[in-house]
Image (tube, rainbow, N blue to C red):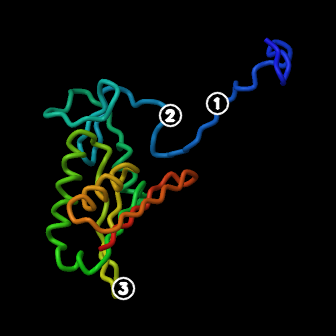
Amino acid sequence: MSGKDGNVAERGRQDRLIKENVHDPYMTRSKPVEPTVCPECRVVFTSGRWQWLAEIPEGANSELCPACQRIHDRVPAGILTLRGEFLAQHRDEIMSLVHNKVDAEKAQHPMKRLMNIEDEEDEEGGVVITFTDVHLPRGVGEAIARAYEGDLDIHYTEEAGIVRVYWTR
C-alpha cells in the first residue's frame, strides 16, 4: 500500500528501534537466578517476582533487592511532602494513616517501601517522606487527601523517573 510517504517495501520500516521512555537503574534488565534472597530484608525472588515467603528456600542465592539497593544508596523514587497547620494538629493520625497504607502495599508488593521520614526545619514544620516506588507516594497522598481533604499536587518528572507529591491543609 502506498501513501503519502511511499511504499513501505521500498523505504523499509521506520519503527524497528524500540525507545526506552524511562530508565530506572534500580530495575534490572535481567531477572535474578531463582531463588534469590535479599540479605537485608529477606524478600525472595521466586516465580519471576520478589515476594515475602515464610521460609527461605535452601540453596538460595544472595543479592540485594532493588528496594534495599535504593535505601542503601539513598535514592528515592518518590517524595511526599506534608505541610500545614492541620498537619501540626493531627500529625499522629496522619502518620498512622501513612504507615497503614505503606504496610498494606508492602505486604502485596515488597518493592514498595517507605525509606525515610524527615521533619523539615522551617517555620511551617512540614514532613518529607521518601519511598522506593513511584506509585506509593501518590497512593499515600491520595489516601490523606480522601481522609482529611486539603490540596494535593502531584509532579512526575519522566526524565528523572521520580514523583513529587505535595499535600497541604
Query: Is 137 positioned to the left or the right of 162 in the image?
Result: left
Disc 3 versus disc 1: distance between alpha carbons?
Answer: 46 Å
Element marked by disc 1: loop
State the residue position of label 2: 29
> How far across and how far down the image is residue 20, in percent?
60, 38
> Which residue is the extreme one toward the bottom?
123
The residue shown at (35%, 48%) is 67
Residue nearest the observer in this picture, 144 or 134: 144
> How far across and how far down the image is residue 6, in percent?
85, 19
The residue shown at (70%, 24%) is 16
State the residue position of label 3: 122
Tell me the kind of residue under disc 2: Arg
Which tag is nearer the camera, tag 1 or tag 2? 1
The residue shown at (50%, 45%) is 24
Q: Indicate which disc residue 18 carries.
A: 1
Establish if 168 lies above or below 12: below
Element marked by disc 3: loop
Tell me the kind of residue under disc 1: Ile
Mark closer to the chain start, 1 or 2: 1
Q: Quadrant of residue 77?
A: bottom left
Tell me the kind of residue under disc 3: Asp
The quadrant of the rendering that contains the N terminus is top right
Instruction: Check disc 1: other Cα within 10 Å, few if <14, some if 14-19, many if 20+.
Output: few
Query: Is 107 positioned to the left or the right of 47 in the image?
Result: left
Disc 1 versus disc 2: distance between alpha carbons?
Answer: 15 Å
Disc 3 versus disc 2: distance between alpha carbons?
Answer: 41 Å
